[in-house]
Image: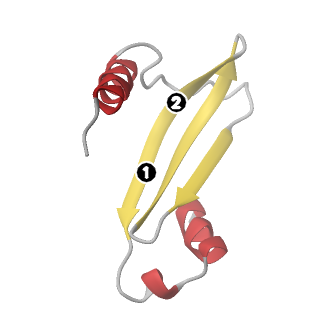
């Protein structure tokens, strides 16, 4: 059920994805960070750097899992996002 709170959260998320910080070029003098997550259907990752206390995304990755990968454990699914 789509509630007014869900609509508000969706609009907030959509707004955040369309405003700063959007993708920024990498600064090779700073360390890189990688966040990975997986579900039963897909895996995803974001490469980012911290600049002035804010996390700035450099690139995103997502991939739908194939039938064999769907049988992986959660740790294996997340590890596949690292690859």
Q: Is residue 30 left or right of residue 43?
A: right
Q: Residue 77: x percent and y percent? A: 55, 72
Element type at mark 2:
strand
Q: Residue at x 53, y 43 (%)?
A: 46
Camera-side residue: 11 or 76?
Answer: 11
Q: Residue at x 33, y 18 (%)?
A: 15
Q: Residue furthest left?
A: 2
Q: Residue at x 60, y 80 (%)?
A: 73
Decide: is 71 above or below 63. Answer: below
Q: Residue 37: x percent and y percent? A: 56, 56
Please rate how many residues cluster around mark 2, counting C-alpha atoms within 10 Å: few if below 14, some from 14 to 19, many from 20.
Answer: many
Element type at mark 1:
strand
The circle drawn on residue 61 is: 1
Q: Is residue 26 left or right of residue 8?
A: right
Decide: is 53 above or below 75. Answer: above
The circle drawn on residue 37 is: none
Decide: is 10 above or below 82. Answer: above
CA separation in Å, label 1 and label 2 = 11 Å
Quarter holding residue 70: bottom left
Quarter holding residue 53: top right
Q: How is the image coloured?
A: secondary structure
Q: Residue at x 54, y 62 (%)?
A: 81
Quarter holding residue 30: top right
Q: Residue 64: x percent and y percent? A: 34, 67
Instruction: State the residue position of label 2.
Output: 57
């Amino acid at each position: 059920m789509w509630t007014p709170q869900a609509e508000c959260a969706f609009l907030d998320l959509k707004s955040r994805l369309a405003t700063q910080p959007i993708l920024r070029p990498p600064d090779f003098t700073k360390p890189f960070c990688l966040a990975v997550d997986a579900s039963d259907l897909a895996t995803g990752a974001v490469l980012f750097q911290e600049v002035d206390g804010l996390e700035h995304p450099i690139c995103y990755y997502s991939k739908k899992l194939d039938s064999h990968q769907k049988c992986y454990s959660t740790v294996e699914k997340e590890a596949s996002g690292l690859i």
